[in-house]
Amino acid sequence: MAQIILIISDKELKTILQNKLVSSYGFDVLTKETVAEAISMLEILPDIALVVCDIMTGKEAAVKKMYDYLEKNKADFSNEIKMVLLSNDKTFYPNCHIVGPQPNHQKLIKHIGFLLGKDSGNLDFFYEPPKELNEAQEESKTTIFQMPILSKPVAQATTKIKFDQLVVEYLPISSKYLLYLPETEMNFSAYTRFKKGNEFEYNKKITEGTILKKEDLDKIILRSGKEIYIEKQEFSMAIDYLNSLIIEKLQNYNLEPLHRVQLNSDSYEILLDVFKKLSFDKSSIEIIKELTKSVDQMANSPDCMELLSIEYQKRKICYGYAHSQISVNLLLAISEKFSWQNDISKNKIILLALLHDLTLRSDRLIKLHHRYSEESKNLTEEEKQIILNHADDAATMIEKMVKSPQELLVLLREHHGVRGGKGLSNILNTTILPVNMAFIVIEEFVAKYLAIIDKNILENKENETIMTKQQIDSILNEMKVKFEKTTYREVTDRLQKFFAYA
């Protein structure tokens, strides 16, 4: 049974939390007056999973004292102990969740349940700051929660560098963020990493307080690879700021289609990196919401598929986004011809296409998993497990993140035709939802479509027509042999009619 320690001065809140956390989730709740008393419990009780505290308890700086103890003794604990902080104050302590000084009691109880895996969470599960909260304080808010739910989560890469007695830790973020930095004074520093002997060294490329020009950023992006590094104490502030830039861009509904395609692809890669590290905050969820709208807007754009194909052939957009956007376009185009279209919203179709492969953790595995039977011999055991479990992982992760419609979770879990979401089916399952059958057919088509573009690149045929009608007919005729049952065959026929009139 998970145990929780409360170190809070509000007696009414303390009583409510103690009673509700026991009755709602069965947690063992202990109340202590001081950090010293709480630490004495931590030293003898093995199952303490979370500490709730005020930033000050009496005259004691509770958060700092508690965090210093947890950090110093973390090797002695069997699990990572989380903290919930009743304050507006900014903190860089990891695993510290800021909920405000006077949080809604019901939301706080559910949020604690969420943090300890007993509640599904909610998109709006973040406190509303008081009206007088100033702009600087508003920008400093962050609520980061880890998702320890996949079979083998990827650890957040942290490197410690010693300068005399000072230890500096660095955390990686996607270099795609740099594409959207304006020419303004930087409020954090950023580094590139290189290996020297058996150690990593860090080279400062962006200095706090400087103004970078676009050409300077382009050079940094070119040399930094897929990731740049931020000092740990600046990480929360930096990621909040960078995510806000992406969200602002996605909300610009006047973007030219070319710019929107590139922005959508970059946003998809940022989410792929977030899913890989299993670290989300409120702005990550906002990116998902705004990217869903942007994908929908792109689907309504004339010549969208041709633009996607050209940009993919130029390697300007990633495979995962190209596959998802083309799948959305085709599924929306043919679904209106089927009776099951009335039972599922357009939003769920877009979310299915957008989210279903993010738990594959890399663009490479997204591409390879469509040819799993041929490629499995070249994959590590860990990569095989990631692929075989990714459908269930996607549904589980979304279920943990937000309150999601049950139908969306089923769509994600069964998008490879396997009930339960574990494995890849070699048979045509007719017991799954019709929209999943349609999605399986469309995924097969898109994978074969993009494979032809990849082949053109390998054979240096980039100047040839992206895709001929004969090539599309060849793909569909091959698919008709495989998809011979009911809805599967109907969707294949509908695709052929769609391209005949396109």
Image (cartoon, rainbow, N blue to C red):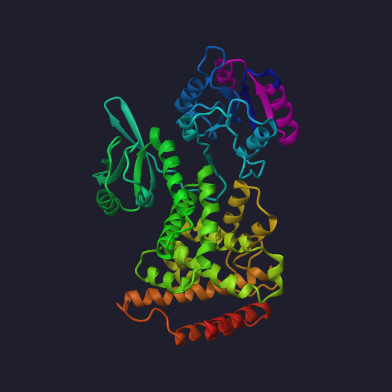
Across and down, in percent, residue 108 comes to 65, 33
Across and down, in percent, residue 218 comes to 28, 53
Query: What residue is rendered at 64% in x and 43% in y?
Result: 121
Find the residue positioned furthest to the right.
23
Left or right placement of residue 166 versus residue 393 in this view = left
Residue 318 in view = yes
Residue 29 forms part of the magenta stretch: yes
Query: What residue is rendered at 61% in x and 45% in y?
Result: 123
Find the residue positioned furthest to the top.
59
Whether residue 334 is situated above or below residue 112 in the rendered picture: below
Q: Nearer the viewer, residue 111 or 218?
A: 218
Bounds of the magenta segment: 13-41
Q: Nearer the viewer, residue 194 or 111?
A: 111
Residue 280 in view = no
Q: Please count the marks in the image.
A: 0
Across and down, in percent, residue 93 comes to 47, 30
Q: Which quadrant of the figure has residue 22?
A: top right
Query: What residue is rendered at 55% in x and 27% in y?
Result: 132
Magenta segment main secondary structure: helix
Residue 229 forms part of the magenta stretch: no
Whether residue 390 is situated above or below residue 96 in the rendered picture: below
Query: What residue is rendered at 58% in x and 84% in y?
Result: 497
| Image quadrant occupied by the N terminus | top right
Across and down, in percent, residue 308 comes to 43, 69
Left or right placement of residue 217 versus residue 126 in this view = left
Whether residue 360 is situated above or below residue 335 in the rendered picture: above
